[in-house]
């Protein structure tokens, strides 16, 4: 991995930042009627052209699926169904497990539960089934659907945290509804998985696994290169992008310097926002950049790369934990891609919210700019979104 010349020379480079007056981002509540909303994942669950949401309520012990009511009604609470009751859910994601065109939900649980569940929709109800291969086996933190073996439909990449934690993949059997037949394939030891994204990191036409691991000796931003052995079975090689000296949280991909290559940004707990400039197409050479967090913000949690104000330049949005009486959600912009001066702009204010989470950038009101969806679980703001004021209806 390459770093800037100043970093290689041992100097500390302070990225300049400032604050600017900005229009108010109005917060809208999708749901705050349970406890401990913990992450939002999105997909068009009911095939109506609108992105729907799924969230695990950690303290409430529920998995809820939210049906997007469309742009005109998006500012009010959303209708939802309860996909299942499970203890300590940490993540929930949509996946069409049996390939019938109807998405199911997969939930990952930690605490004393330590299990992964499939939630099958049955007309007007849901059935929840624990996956035997992973039942009571780990503190499961995150799941990403991925068709790895190209045999029986989608497989699942899942990561855990804690002692003897693993990142691996759950292999779909010939009949995916036979939950006991799903097979666990460990890939690597981890400390605490935060993000998993399925993406082609080296441009060879197949999908790899990009992930952040925030704890212990193997922490950092890494990716597993997918290759096929002579027998046709998957084999994997781990590559490190960076972040082995810091507690990396969620990640986001996008072209921050507009050179046509996909860069990666990570939020860092008790550290600077860090982004990695892709130096070539191999996925193995990166230039590290740091942006100091302002003193009145919490600690880094979520991150998103997008063009917030539609000026043609990609910006950064970040969310925070430990943001009581501090800023929990902000965005950063700069005047040009060569500038090291980032201007911080407030989104959520100083009054409400302590522990914000994963960010999703979606134009919910269909006005042409990207709004910000997230969860907040300490003040119990719940499942919320902030309306981007760039374009006003």
Image (cartoon, rainbow, N blue to C red):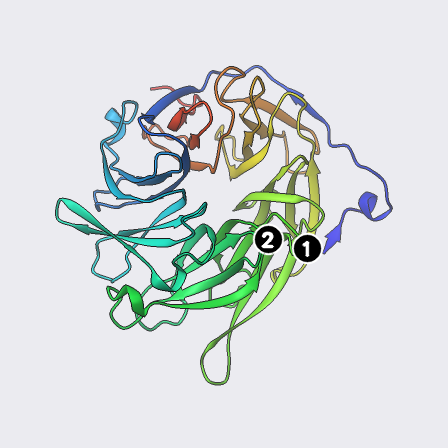
Q: Residues within 10 Å of mark 1 (few under 14, many from 20)?
A: few
The quadrant in which residue 280 appears is: bottom right
Residue found at x 51% / y 29%:
355
Task: Identify the residue position indicated by label 1 in the image.
Answer: 217
Tell me, yes or no, whether the two marked residues, 2 and 1, touch with CB atoms within 8 Å: yes
If the image is split into quadrants, where does the C terminus sit?
A: top left
Badge 2 or badge 1: first in the primary sequence: 2
Mark carried by residue 391: none
Instruction: Please say if 158 is above or below 20.
Output: below
Q: Secondary structure at mark 1?
A: loop
Residue found at x 26% / y 29%:
78
Asked if one can make out residue 260 in the rendered structure from this viewpoint, the answer is no
From the viewer's side, name the closer residue of 277 and 146: 146
Q: In the picture provided, is 46 more to the left or to the right than 54?
A: left
Q: In the picture provided, is 109 more to the left or to the right than 252?
A: left
Q: In the picture provided, is 263 more to the left or to the right than 207?
A: right
If the image is split into quadrants, where does the N terminus sit?
A: bottom right
Asked if one can make out residue 244 in the rendered structure from this viewpoint, the answer is yes
Q: Residue furthest bottom?
A: 230
Expressed as whole percent of the image width and height from the top left, the position of residue 218 reads 65, 56
State how far apart marks 2 and 1 are (Cα). 8 Å
Expressed as whole percent of the image width and height from the top left, the position of residue 101 reads 21, 57
Residue found at x 46% / y 16%:
24
Instruction: Please say if 178 is above or below 339.
Output: below
Expressed as whole percent of the image width and height from the top left, the position of residue 201 reads 54, 60
Residue found at x 63% / y 25%:
343
Task: Identify the residue position indicated by label 2 in the image.
Answer: 191
Instruction: Please say if 252 is above or below 356.
Output: below
From the viewer's side, name the closer residue of 21 and 325: 325
């Amino acid at each position: 991995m390459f770093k800037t010349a100043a970093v290689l020379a041992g100097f500390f480079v302070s990225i300049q930042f400032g604050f600017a007056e900005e229009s108010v981002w109005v917060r809208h509540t999708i749901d705050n009627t349970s406890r401990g909303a913990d992450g939002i994942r999105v997909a068009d669950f009911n095939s109506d052209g609108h992105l729907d949401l799924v969230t695990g309520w950690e303290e409430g012990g529920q998995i809820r699926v939210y049906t997007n009511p469309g742009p005109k009604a998006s500012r009010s609470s959303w209708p939802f169904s309860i996909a299942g009751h499970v203890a300590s859910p940490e993540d929930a994601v949509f996946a069409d497990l049996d390939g019938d065109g109807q998405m199911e939900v997969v939930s990952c649980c930690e605490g004393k539960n330590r299990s992964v569940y499939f939630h099958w929709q049955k007309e007007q109800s849901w059935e929840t089934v624990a996956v035997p291969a992973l039942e009571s086996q780990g503190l499961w933190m995150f799941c990403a659907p991925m068709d790895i073996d190209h045999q029986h439909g989608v497989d699942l990449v899942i990561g855990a945290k804690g002692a003897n934690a693993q990142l691996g993949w759950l292999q779909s059997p010939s009949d995916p509804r036979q939950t006991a037949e799903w097979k666990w394939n460990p890939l690597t030891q981890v400390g605490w998985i935060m993000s998993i994204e399925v993406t082609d990191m080296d441009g060879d036409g197949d999908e790899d696994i990009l992930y952040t691991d925030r704890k212990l000796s193997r922490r950092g931003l890494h990716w597993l290169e997918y290759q096929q052995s002579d027998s046709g079975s998957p084999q994997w090689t781990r590559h490190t992008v960076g972040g082995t000296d810091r507690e990396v949280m969620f990640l986001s991909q996008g072209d921050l310097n507009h050179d046509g290559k996909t860069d990666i940004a990570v939020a860092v707990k008790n550290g600077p926002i860090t982004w990695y400039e892709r130096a070539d197409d191999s996925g193995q050479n990166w230039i590290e950049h740091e942006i100091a967090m302002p003193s009145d913000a919490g600690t880094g949690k979520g991150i998103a790369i997008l063009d917030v104000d539609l000026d043609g330049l990609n910006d950064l949005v970040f969310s925070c934990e430990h943001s009581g009486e501090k800023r929990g959600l902000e965005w950063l912009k700069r005047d040009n891609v060569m500038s090291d001066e980032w201007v911080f702009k407030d989104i959520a204010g100083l009054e409400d919210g302590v522990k914000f989470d994963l960010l999703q950038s979606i134009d919910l009101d269909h006005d042409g700019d990207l709004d910000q969806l997230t969860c907040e679980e300490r003040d119990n703001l719940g499942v919320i979104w902030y309306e981007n004021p760039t374009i006003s209806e």
